[in-house]
């Protein structure tokens, strides 16, 4: 339920609500705006009489949350969530672009790509150090060595790092190197992992599962939010259908639907959703036009030699052209691209 406080409610009255919720075995989450404070009371509220809170000092109204996901819903927070990630802001009116290779393969590959995508206008660098692969014989990533190379690329370019974490026991390690922890599609419902990244309070990019509904995606986000970690981005990366012309089917519908149901930023991955570099630019443009808050795109200096997902990776020159197109579309719909941070002084 939502407990909406009077505009004149003081801190003592707010603390009393939180204390009462705690006594009832519930969790209280505060959303404090310029004009009012809203307290989301989460847990099994069925035995709780709304009047217990309604009669307390400073309370204006008690409203039930109808969605199964509470903290992620616009009922809990009508305004969009926006937060900073080492030099840029995600979730606001400006669009962010995350780019880089599927996997970190070598120092020259990741550093070269980092410089190329930064020059083209990217705001963050993606790259996998630990890779979940369908086949156990496929390249599994460089592990810690890959994380160290990502850190080196960040030092040279100033680009914050987005990389995947696959297991709860790896969260602390990956968080030492990454600015954003990515939860891959196969792990969207890995609940111990969701708890762990929530407890880390590190920014999270949560990818939609291969056959998951939007409600299931939002419930997975709820696991992270329930630990007080509000820096969560949702990522539409294509879903599995009967169509075989592309790797997955891009659910463009998901973007406006999610934007209507949740306050969390919505990112589109046109690389995994198509699986073919030839279609990436068109789907990326469509995603921005549909209202996406950002894009995550695979870029590789030599896709033909890539150890993973080369077929869906753009060459740097194609990526640079796409960024220009995205900027034009963003301007046409009253948005823009985030201004890149200045290069670090070496």
Image (cartoon, rainbow, N blue to C red):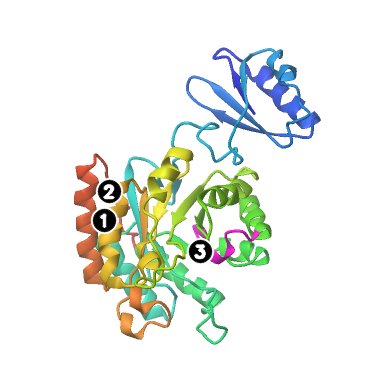
Dot 1 and dot 3 residues touching (CB under 8 Å): no
In which image quadrant can residue 92 be found? top left
| Disc 3, SS | loop
Residue pointed to by mark 2: 289
Would you call the spot at circle 3 few (<14 residues within 10 Å), some (14-19), or many (20 or more)? many
Q: Position of residue 200 (x, y in %)?
A: 62, 53
Would you call the spot at circle 2 few (<14 residues within 10 Å), some (14-19), or many (20 or more)? some
Q: Which residues are magenta?
A: 177-190
Q: Position of residue 250 (x, y in %)?
A: 38, 60
Dot 3 and dot 2 residues touching (CB under 8 Å): no
120 is within the stretch colored magenta: no
Q: Which mark is residue 117?
A: none
Residue pointed to by mark 1: 285
In which image quadrant can residue 306 be found? bottom left
Work out whether residue 203 or residue 144 is closer to the camera in this orientation and state it: 203
- What residue sits 44% from the left and 37% below the top? 80
Dot 3 or dot 2, earlier in sequence? 3
Position of 50 with respect to 130 (left or right) is right
Dot 1 or dot 3, earlier in sequence? 3
Dot 1 and dot 2 residues touching (CB under 8 Å): yes
Residue pointed to by mark 3: 210
Q: Position of residue 110 (x, y in %)?
A: 38, 74
Would you call the spot at circle 1 few (<14 residues within 10 Å), some (14-19), or many (20 or more)? many
Alpha-carbon span between mark 1 and mark 2: 6 Å
């Amino acid at each position: 339920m939502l407990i909406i406080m009077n505009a004149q409610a003081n801190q003592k009255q707010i603390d009393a609500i939180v204390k009462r919720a705690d006594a009832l075995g519930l969790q209280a989450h505060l959303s404090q705006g310029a004009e009012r404070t809203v307290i989301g009371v989460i847990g099994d509220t069925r035995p709780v009489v709304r009047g217990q809170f309604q009669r307390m000092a400073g309370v204006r109204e008690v409203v039930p949350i109808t969605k199964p996901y509470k903290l992620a819903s616009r009922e809990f927070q009508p305004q969009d969530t926006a937060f900073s990630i080492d030099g840029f802001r995600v979730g606001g009116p400006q669009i962010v672009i995350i780019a880089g290779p599927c996997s970190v393969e070598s120092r020259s590959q990741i550093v070269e790509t980092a410089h190329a995508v930064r020059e083209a206008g990217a705001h963050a660098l993606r790259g996998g150090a630990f890779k979940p692969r369908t086949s156990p014989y496929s390249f599994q990533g460089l592990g810690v060595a890959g994380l160290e190379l990502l850190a080196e690329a960040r030092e040279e370019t100033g680009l914050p790092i987005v990389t995947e974490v696959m297991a709860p026991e790896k969260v602390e390690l990956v968080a030492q190197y990454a600015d954003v922890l990515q939860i891959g599609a196969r792990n969207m419902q890995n609940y111990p992992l969701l708890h762990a990244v929530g407890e880390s309070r590190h920014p999270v990019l949560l990818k939609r599962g291969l056959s998951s509904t939007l409600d299931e995606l939002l419930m997975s986000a709820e696991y992270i939010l329930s630990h007080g970690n509000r820096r969560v981005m949702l990522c539409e990366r294509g879903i599995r259908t009967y169509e075989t012309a592309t790797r997955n089917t891009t659910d463009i519908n998901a973007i406006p639907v999610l934007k209507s149901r949740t306050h969390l930023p919505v990112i589109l991955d046109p690389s995994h959703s198509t699986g073919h570099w030839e279609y990436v630019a068109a789907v990326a443009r469509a995603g921005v036009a549909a209202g996406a808050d950002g894009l995550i795109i695979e870029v590789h200096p030599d896709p033909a030699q890539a150890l993973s997902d080369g077929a869906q990776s753009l060459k740097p020159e194609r990526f640079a052209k796409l960024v220009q197109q995205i900027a034009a579309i963003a301007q046409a719909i009253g948005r823009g691209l985030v201004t890149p941070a200045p290069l670090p002084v070496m």
